[in-house]
Image (cartoon, helix red, strand yellow):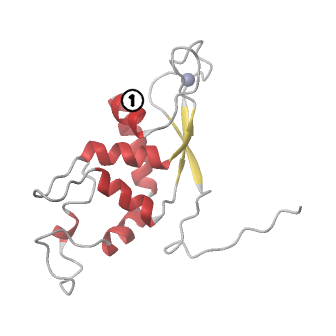
Amino acid sequence: MATAPPIPVPIRRFADPDAVDTVELPGPCSCPGSPHDPHDTAVYRTQLGGGERQSIATAGSINGFGSYYDHEAAESQLIAVALRSWTLQNAKGEPMPITFDVVHRRLDAATRKALSDTINDAHQDQLRAEMAMLPKAPGARSPGSSRVNGSRRRSTRARK
Ligand SMILES: [Zn+2]
């Protein structure tokens, strides 16, 4: 069957699930036998759907007994959701699965930061559009208030 031409979509409304880029991870490859000399790499999606973006914000939030925000949980969810593949292996030379648990509980801080910075940079424009459409946190201004008010991103925007 012939390959159909790609369907052009308006970027602000539909994320392209196949839009990806590659990042080199900091430090040398430490997989058994150093098969990825000099660097490990990761392939990440450069566009995320609104539901995925919402689940990243929700990963760091607890509602019901006051507001709470766990930056690291949201960061782990961002990495786990956005990563398509990486070269990282375990001590047996088997591929490390990309899951929230692996990213949150096992991945080192330098690699987490490199991944989240890269992914966040790639999603800056999309992030701004998503945040502008999110429901407001309790105690925030009413929907009719000005969009230029900087406080509206306080509870959901990942801090550096
Ligand atoms: Zn490696």
Picture coordinates of residue 122, whole percent (x, y): 46, 55
Q: Is residue 68 visible?
A: yes
Q: Is residue 112 left or right of residue 159?
A: right
Residue at the far top in the pictured view: 33
Q: Secondary structure at mark 1?
A: loop
* Residue found 56% across the figure and 76% down from its top: 10
Q: Amino acid at mark 1?
A: Leu
Q: Eyeballing the image, is 65 above or below 93?
A: below
Picture coordinates of residue 1, whole percent (x, y): 89, 61
Ligand 1 near label 1 (Cβ, under 8 Å)? Answer: no
Residue 157 occupies quadrant = bottom left
Picture coordinates of residue 45, whole percent (x, y): 53, 52
Residue at the far bottom in the pictured view: 144
Identify which residue, 87 or 135, lies in the foreground. 135
Q: Tell me the residue that label 1 is attached to.
A: 107
The image quadrant where one finds ligand 1 is top right
How many numbered marks appear?
1
Q: Eyeballing the image, is 150 above or below 141?
A: above
* Residue found 39% across the figure and 52% down from its top: 120
* Residue found 37% across the figure and 27% down from its top: 106
Residue at the far front in the pictured view: 64
Q: Is residue 117 visible?
A: no
Residue 115 occupies quadrant = top left
| Dot 1 alpha-carbon crowd within 10 angstroms: few under 14, some 14 to 19, many 20 or more | few
* Residue found 58% across the figure and 59% down from its top: 17
Picture coordinates of residue 155, whole percent (x, y): 20, 60
